[in-house]
Amino acid sequence: MDSECRSADAERLATTVLETIGPPGSWRSAPSGYPDSLALCVLDAIWSIGVRYSAVENVVRRYRQARRAEGGDADRDTASDLLRFIDLLGGADEFALRVGNRQRVSTHAGAVRKADAVRRAAQALHETGAETVSDLRAVAAGPNAARLKDVWLALPGQSSGLSWHYLLMLAGLPGVKPDRMVCRFVARALERERVPPAEAACLVKRAAVLLDVSPTALDHEIWRHER
C-alpha cells in the first residue's frame, strides 16, 4: 500500500489536518472499541458500512439489552456467544427483528440482511479459532492472517475490505477505515475529484506519522470532522 501514495501528498494532507481540524492536542480521544467483546466488534464493523452511525449505536444498544435480559454480558461476548444467541432466537431474521434493524449489506437485488452477514461472520471466526478479541489480534499478527482476511472478505457485502479494517480497529489494532468520509477529506486536501480507498488509507497512515499520532486517532478525527 505504501507504494500507492506519495510523501508529498501525505505532507499536504498533514498540513490540511492542522489547518482545518487543529493540532492533535485539541482532538477528542478516539473510541476504545470493544476490548473484551468480539461480538460487538463484529456487529459494529458490519452494520457501520453505508449507514449513519446512529443506526449502529442502536443495534449495539439493543444487543446489549437483549443479552442483559437473559443474564449475559454483551461487553464480554465471544464469537460463539453471538452465534449461539442468534441461533437461539431462530436465525438471522429473528435477530434482525430483535436488534431493530433489517438493513441489507447492499442495495443489489438479492443482497442478504446485515444480520445474516453477522451470523456468517461469527461462524467464520469461530471456525478459524478467533473466539475473542485477543484471539483476533493474535491471528491478525500471525501466519494465518491472510487466510482469516480472505474468509472475512468472502462474506456477503464485505469484499471491499472496509469492514475488515474496521473490525481490526475496533479490536484495538491501529489502522484506517477508508470510507467515503475519509476519502472525501483526503481528496479535498489534495484538490482532486476522488482518491481511491487504498491510497487514502496509505496517505492517512503516512500523515499520522508526520503528526506523531496513531493512524486510528487521525482516522477518527477526520471521520468526526466530516460527519
Image: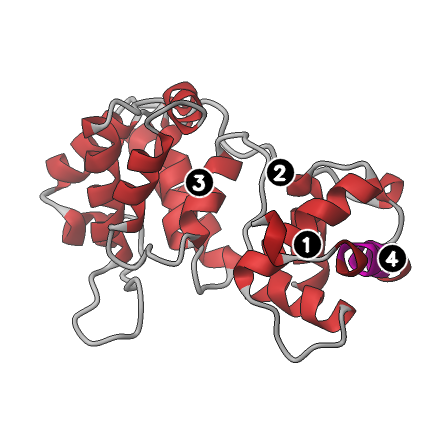
Q: Is residue 138 above or below residue 227?
A: above
Q: Is residue 56 above or below residue 86?
A: below
Crowd tier of the residue under label 2, counting other residues whose Cα lies within 10 Å: few below 14, some 14–19, many 20 or above: few
Q: Main secondary structure of the magenta part?
A: helix
Amino acid at circle 1: Leu
User: Mark 1 highlights which residue?
Assistant: 203
Q: Which mark is residue 15?
A: 4
User: Mark 2 highlights which residue?
Assistant: 31
> Along the polypeptide, which appears first: circle 2 or circle 4?
4
Residue at 83% from the left image edge and 42% from the top image edge:
211
Q: Which mark is residue 167?
A: 3
Foreground tag (2 vs 1)? 1
**What element does badge 2 sit on?**
loop
> Along the polypeptide, which appears first: circle 1 or circle 3?
3
Residue 189 picture location, percent across and down: 77, 68
Q: CA distance from mark 1 to mark 3?
A: 20 Å
Amino acid at circle 2: Pro
Residue 90 picture location, percent across and down: 9, 43
Amino acid at circle 4: Thr
> Along the polypeptide, which appears first: circle 3 or circle 4?
4
Q: Is residue 96 above or below residue 63?
A: below
